[in-house]
Amino acid sequence: MVTALTETASAPQAFSYDKPSRSVFPDGYKTSGQWPPVYEQLRPYSDFPKEITGQTVWKAEDYTNNPERWTHRFSDEETQQLGEAADALWHLARP
């Protein structure tokens, strides 16, 4: 598994809304990534279905008393694989 922190963290940089850090926001813009709406694609609420139907609809009664249908217990092997993947990612992300 990923090891514990062994180095002291440096003091965080002062945050400024008017001058965002280029180390955090390389292009200098601090955004959520949200794009403006495409107004001709917006639909009024009344256009949406009142009920969703079809083969892919989940019904509460199918799952309420059947947790095995929507939960997964990881085996020891799967847990080991996840740990190895996390370790590999940890080492890739380090400078």
Image: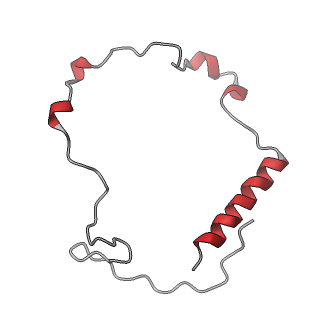
Residue drawn at x 55%, y 17% is: 59
Q: Which quadrant would residue 40 be assigned to in this image?
A: top left
Q: Quadrant of the N terminus?
A: bottom right
User: Does residue 11 sit above or below 33 in this rendering?
Assistant: below
Of residues 88 and 20, the one nearer the viewer is 88
Q: Residue at x 20, y 31 (%)?
A: 42
Picture quarter containing residue 83? bottom right
* Residue 73 placement (x, y as % from top left): 76, 39
Residue 69 pos. (x, y %): 69, 26
* Quadrant where the C terminus is found in the figure: bottom right
Query: As drawn, is 35 to the left or to the right of 6?
Result: left
Residue at 84% of width from left, 49% of height from top?
76
Residue 30 appears at what percent x and percent y? 28, 66
Identify the image quadrant of residue 84: bottom right
The reply, left or right, for residue 58 in relation to residue 82 is left
Q: Residue at x 15, y 36 (%)?
A: 39
Vertical arrangement, residue 81 with respect to residue 94, above or below: above
